[in-house]
Amino acid sequence: MENRELLQIAMRQSAIDLGCRAEDFLRTENVIVRSQSDPRARKYLDLPFSCNLVSYGNNIVASVGESYAEIVENFLAKFEFYRCFETPALQILSDGLSSFGLRICFMAEYFLPDMGAMKELSCPFSLRILEKEQLATFYLPMWSNALSMEHRERDVFAVGAFDGDTLLGLAGCSADCDTMWQIGVDVLPQFRRRGIGSALVSRLALEILRRGEVPFYCAAWSNLRSKNTALKCGFRPAWVELTAKPAAYTQKLIDAMTKK
């Protein structure tokens, strides 16, 4: 696959997720659509959205509930599209949505392979492909980014870094939709900064492409370590997303993240 084809596949999937057209992401003006459920959407999405903003670098496509359309439309009209993801501007959106019991919850950057930069990286340890039937013993807290405890049926296969029979790092892929598999990776803390994460991700991404699917990688904007891993492996930024969720849901996540 070429880069253009990978991007088109991602845009078509985002169009399904948001309830818009793929060409909407290429327009110069912002687009607002009403969110709706779709069985073809990425499986981890909770549809319909209250408010979800997506940009592929040209504009913003906003998928919203009817009750929040006016707030989002007024917000988008105030700023250049890229500034709508900046903290000062987001205060306005946050204030408007708070009256409906919503809070800004997720902000993430998504990466696609650059086929001219993808390459297999090495590390000092042995890498092994683990097929789905070999993953059962690895559903443990230390591998929670690589594998999904709650949705094991989506995990397709993984690549592990081993020292003998000891697993040091694991990268897995989840079949989140029909054409795109998401990559997650974990490395034991004492073995980080030894090239294991990038070796795992590069090997996994190339294997996903070999199997005819599109690998994609997601990272929080502040997670530089994760983003650097993606860049080192030949991934490049493709789109960004912002999602608002009910305040109770957001608070639950805050409580889980808080250091005890």
Image: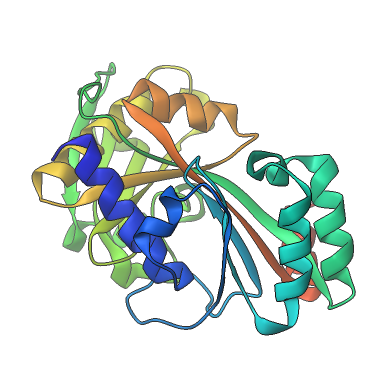
Report the side of 164 relative to 19 (left or right).
Answer: left
- The picture places residue 237, in percent across and down from the top left corner, at 44, 34
- Please give the name of the residue rendered at 18% of the width and 63% of the height, measured from the top-left corner: 133
- Is 50 located above or below residue 10 in the figure? below
Q: Is residue 256 visible?
A: no
- Please give the name of the residue rendered at 10% of the width and 50% of the height, measured from the top-left corner: 211
Report the side of 77 relative to 98 (left or right).
Answer: left
Residue toward you, 246 or 188: 246
- Please give the name of the residue rendered at 21% of the width and 22% of the height, measured from the top-left corner: 116
- The picture places residue 182, in percent across and down from the top left corner, at 35, 52
* Quarter location, residue 243: bottom right
- The picture places residue 168, in percent across and down from the top left corner, at 37, 33
- Please give the name of the residue rendered at 70% of the width and 65% of the height, measured from the top-left corner: 244
Residue toward you, 32 or 198: 32
Residue toward you, 103 or 145: 103
Q: Is residue 172 visible?
A: yes
Colour scheme shown:
rainbow
* Quarter location, residue 77: bottom right
* Quarter location, residue 195: top left
- The picture places residue 70, in percent across and down from the top left corner, at 76, 73
Q: How many marks?
A: 0
- Is 70 located above or below residue 198 in the figure? below
